[in-house]
């Protein structure tokens, strides 16, 4: 199960990188609200990465925020995209929220396993 979560997390990270850096005309649109799409993608990435690597949660939280900032900066290198501070804020906040939810779930699951093992 843990391996499946890790694979899903890295597939999502790769998709986020690709979707963020492709020309705007190739960017898929799922909903009418791009901020919702950004938030959902980064929250899910933070959640899955934290569930997949619960002991590395501080690095996951920092890494997802750095990923959001790096990709926003990377958009300035493309001809059809532009990095924006408000987009970064949405992505970073969502990644942190998803990571914290993942941390809470991982902690709950560890306590539950420990309780089952002890009696």
Image (tube, rainbow, N blue to C red):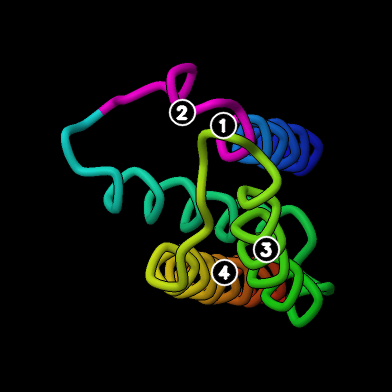
The mark lying in front, picked from 2 and 3, is 2
Identified at 62% across, 76% down, the residue is 107
Q: Mark 1 points at which residue?
A: 19
Q: Name the residue under label 2.
A: 24
The mark lying in front, picked from 3 and 1, is 1
Identified at 61% across, 62% down, the residue is 68
> Marks 4 and 3: CB-CB under 8 Å?
yes
Examine the rendered structure and indicate whether residue 101 appears above or below residue 52. Answer: below
Examine the rendered structure and indicate whether residue 40 appears above or below residue 67. Answer: above
On the rendered image, what quadrant is the N terminus found in? top right
- The answer to which of marks 3 and 1 sits earlier in the sequence is 1
Q: Mark 3 points at which residue?
A: 50
Question: Is 43 left, or right, of 36 in this rendering?
Answer: right
- The answer to which of marks 4 and 3 sits earlier in the sequence is 3
> Marks 2 and 3: CB-CB under 8 Å?
no
Q: Mark 4 points at which residue?
A: 99
């Amino acid at each position: 199960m843990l391996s499946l979560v890790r694979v899903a997390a890295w597939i999502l990270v790769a998709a986020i990188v690709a979707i963020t850096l492709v020309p705007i005309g190739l960017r898929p649109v799922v909903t009418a609200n791009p901020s919702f799409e950004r938030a959902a993608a980064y929250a899910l990435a933070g959640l899955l990465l934290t569930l997949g690597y619960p002991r590395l949660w501080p690095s996951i939280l920092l890494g997802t925020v750095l990923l959001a900032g790096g990709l926003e900066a990377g958009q300035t290198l493309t001809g059809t995209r532009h990095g924006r501070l408000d987009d970064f804020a949405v992505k970073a906040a969502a990644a942190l929220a998803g990571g914290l939810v993942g941390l809470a779930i991982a902690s709950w699951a560890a306590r539950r396993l420990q309780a089952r093992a002890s009696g």
